[in-house]
Amino acid sequence: MKKIAAALAAVLLAAPAFAALKTRVVDYKDGDVVLEGYAAWDDSFKGDRPGVLVVHDWLGQGPYAQKRAQMLAKLGYVAFALDMYGKGKFAKDHAEAAKMSGVFFSDRVAMRRRAALGLDELKKLPHVKTSELAAIGYCFGGTTVLELARMGADLRGVASFHGNLATPTPATDTPKAKIAVFQGGDDQMTLPALPAFEDEMRKVKADWELTTYGGAVHGFTVEELGTDASGGLAYNKEADERSWKALQDFFAEIFR
C-alpha cells in the first residue's frame, strides 16, 4: 500500500510540470494551399520570451520536428514547427522526400515565401517576443533557414543542422541574422558545397560560425536513422548532443 501511495504521489508531483507544456496545431495558408504547423511552449516560464521557428527535414512536418519544438519549449522558448509541403503531406520514404523537397530546392523564391509565412505564424503565438526570433532547421530545413538569412529576414540568428549549403541565390547584403552551421565532418552530401558557402559568407561580411563533428555523416541528429554510417546517412549520439549544446550557447548569445 505504501508503494502505491508513493507512486501516486510521484505522479501528482510530476503532473504540474507535464501540464505546463502546451502544444497547438495551427492551420494557415500559402494561397490555396493549406499548411499545418505545430506550436509548443511551456507555461511554467512567465512572460514573453524569444520565439524559434523549426523547419523540418525532407520527410515533412512530423514527429521529429515536433520533438525539437517541444525540446525548445522546455528550454523556455516558444517554438513553431512550420509546414513546407501542405497539410497531411509526409513522405513515405526517401525517394518521395527527394521529390517533395526538390520542388523547393529548384524554386528558392517559393522556399523563401513559405518559410516566411511560417515565421509570420510564429509571431502570432502566445508569449512570443517578436523582437527576438530565431530559426533552426534540419537537412532540407537547414537549407531553408539559410535562405531566410540570405533574404534578410528579421531574425537574431539561424542554425542549420546538416543542411545543404549550396544556393543558386547567394546573399548580396549582410544578413541580419547571425548564422551557425553544424555539419558532419564526413558528410559527403553537403561538404562539397562548403568552400562556396564560406566564400559567400565572407563576401557579405556575415556573422557566421561553422562547427564540424568528426566521424559524423549526414543526418547525425536523427536517431531513427540508426548508427551504421557506411551508407553516408546515420545518427551520431555525440555529435547530436554536442550540437544541441552548441545551439543553446548560440541562443544565449543572440538573445543576451
Image (cartoon, rainbow, N blue to C red):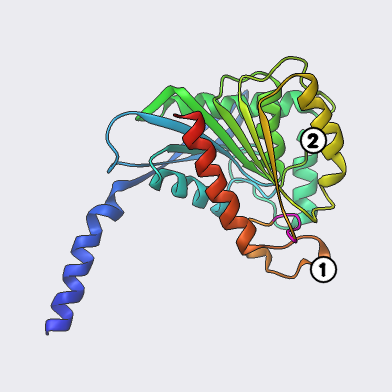
Secondary structure of residue under mark 1: helix
User: In which quadrant will I find the N terminus?
Assistant: bottom left
Q: Residues within 10 Å of mark 2 (few under 14, many from 20)?
A: many
* Residue at x 67% of width, y 62% of height: 235
Quickly name the residue at label 1.
230
Q: Amino acid at mark 1?
A: Ser
User: In which quadrant will I find the C terminus?
Assistant: top left
* Residue at x 19% of width, y 63% of height: 12
* Residue at x 13% of width, y 76% of height: 5
Q: Residue furthest bottom?
A: 1
Numbered label attached to residue 105:
2
Q: Is residue 150 above or below residue 36?
A: above
Q: Is residue 167 visible?
A: no
Query: How many angstroms separate mark 2 from mark 1 (CA)?
Result: 26 Å
In this rendering, which labeled residue sits more in front, label 2 or label 1? 1
Q: Position of residue 19 (x, y in %)?
A: 28, 51
Q: Residues within 10 Å of mark 1 (few under 14, many from 20)?
A: few
Question: Magenta segment: does it hold 94?
Answer: no
Q: Is residue 142 above or below residue 97?
A: above
Q: Tell me where the magenta segment starts and ends, as one range.
A: 215-219
